[in-house]
Image: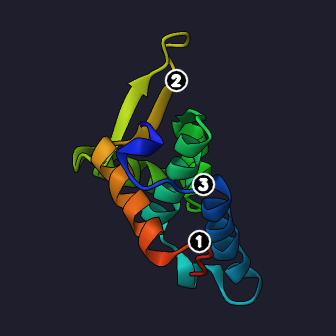
Amino acid sequence: MEAGDGPAVAAETVRLMIRARRLRANYLPAELFADPAWDMLLDLLQAEIVQHRVPVSSLCIAAAVPAITALRWIKSMTDEGLLLRRDDPRDGRRVFIELAPATSVAMRRYFAEIGPVPVV
């Protein structure tokens, strides 16, 4: 996906949001903030911006929930057309996950709307 397919978003902006989300658990119980779908979307957007491919195993870690829960979310979002699965051409055992083009544009529009320094 090219940045021209939606508003440009700085990788640092997405990193700041991810960091802010993780810091909440230092002050309040982490289970209050479990939102694996959003955490995965943020991780995939950041990866897209820096042109990094995300294997399923890494996306499960980014979700900050048990792997089985993350895998259910990945399947659900893939079934809904929000995410795309790509087989690794060099390793048949590995699958990469990426944002579907419409999801990427929606995420970029969201960041354009909230501005450069999001805190949630």
Color encoding of the figure: rainbow
Identify the residue at horizontal 28%, vertical 48% (top origin).
102
* Mark 3 secondary-structure assignment: helix
Q: Which mark is residue 116?
A: 1
Sequence-first tag of 2 and 1 = 2
Q: Are marks 3 and 2 in contact (CB under 8 Å)?
A: no
Give the alpha-carbon distance from disc 2 to disc 1, as whole Å. Answer: 34 Å
Of residue 12 and residue 71, the one placed in the foreground of this image is 12
Identify the residue at horizontal 38%, vertical 63% (top origin).
109
Q: Which mark is residue 94?
A: 2
> Residue 21 falls in which quadrant of the image?
bottom right
* Mark 2 secondary-structure assignment: loop
Q: Which label lies toward us, 2 or 1?
A: 1
Give the alpha-carbon distance from disc 3 to disc 2, as whole Å. Answer: 17 Å
Identify the residue at horizontal 29%, vertical 52% (top origin).
76
Q: Position of residue 69 (x, y in %)?
A: 45, 57
Q: Which mark is residue 62?
A: 3
Callout 1 amino acid: Pro
Q: Position of residue 1 (x, y in %)?
A: 42, 36
Instruction: Determine crowd level at label 1: few under 14, some 14-19, many 20+ residues with C-alpha closer than 10 A.
Output: some
Answer left or right for 90 relative to 23: left
